[in-house]
Image: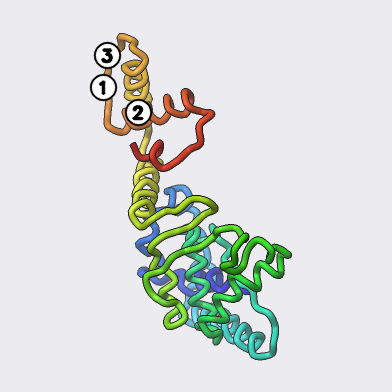
Amino acid sequence: VPTHVTRRMDAMAGDSAFRNDPRRQYIWPEILQSWDADADNMLAMAPSPEERAIVASFYHKGLELTGQAQESGVRILMGTDSGDSFSYFGASAHDELQELVKAGLTPAQALQAATVDAAEFLGMQSDYGSVTEGKVADLILLRANPLEDISNSTSLEAVFMGSRYYDRGALDAMLQNIVTSSAIEGEQLDVGSVRSSLARRLGLNEEGRITSRSEGLAELLLDATRAYQQPLDLQRLFT
């Protein structure tokens, strides 16, 4: 189970484009701080051009070995170390698919490593790994064919999870909610505003400054306490 995205971080720790990936907006500030510190530490351990070249060669050697293993008949499974530094949650699966193709696997072989072979290795092939009637719905619908270009695996149009279907609009709404929550996490919460918003909803006479964020948080708090027995769905989250 190679995880080339982790060695890629080592090799590209000093690359500004790599470190300022647009997907940073979906990661909470505390996690970003730890990622940046990890990359800075990697640079500190190997600062010279010669040392950076050695780190990069280690990353490329890993790709080479994966390709050789595939050619020799070794079954390759896809791993992501999701959450490791610059291994973006969820998206790192698509990154690793591209790394496997870079290593020499065909797009079909890379996809098989992430689906059928992974399910068989875990003994879960009766529920996962292929699109078959009776198996768990755990699917993505794409706008373009990943067999032609593995990067097309990122062209998500919809997601099926069990009995739930999330179209592009719902997925975009989730992403925007992550961006908003990440921004809020990076700020200090105005406790007085939240108290005033809650008091107003509970019919208590308390004057104080309120904000759109304190109003939204108060609404979420009351909904969670009053309707805790109801299933959480997109309508409750975004209305």
Answer with mark 1 or mark 2, whichever residue precedes in sequence.
Answer: 2
Image: 150 above or below 21: below
Image: 150 above or below 38: below
Answer with mark 2 or mark 3, whichever residue precedes in sequence.
Answer: 2
Rounded to the nearest angstrom, the CA distance separating label 1 from label 2 is 10 Å
Q: Position of residue 140 (x, y in %)?
A: 47, 63
Q: Residue at x 36, y 25 (%)?
A: 194
Say which of marks 2 and 3 sits in front.
Answer: 3
> Which residue carries the number 1 mark?
209
Extreme residue in the front direction: 133
Q: Nearer the viewer, residue 168 or 97?
A: 168
Rounded to the nearest angstrom, the CA distance separating label 1 from label 3 is 7 Å
Q: Position of residue 125 (x, y in %)?
A: 68, 66
Is label 1 in contact with label 2 (beta carbons under 8 Å)?
Answer: yes
Q: Amino acid at mark 3?
A: Glu
Q: How is the image coloured?
A: rainbow
Q: Are there few (<14), some (14-19), or many (20+) residues within 10 Å of tag 1?
A: few
Q: Is residue 182 left or right of residue 117?
A: left
Is label 2 in contact with label 3 (beta carbons under 8 Å)?
Answer: no
> Which residue carries the number 3 mark?
207
> Which quadrant would the C terminus be assigned to in this image?
top left
Q: Amino acid at mark 2?
A: Asp
Name the secondary structure under disc 1. Answer: loop
Name the secondary structure under disc 3. Answer: loop
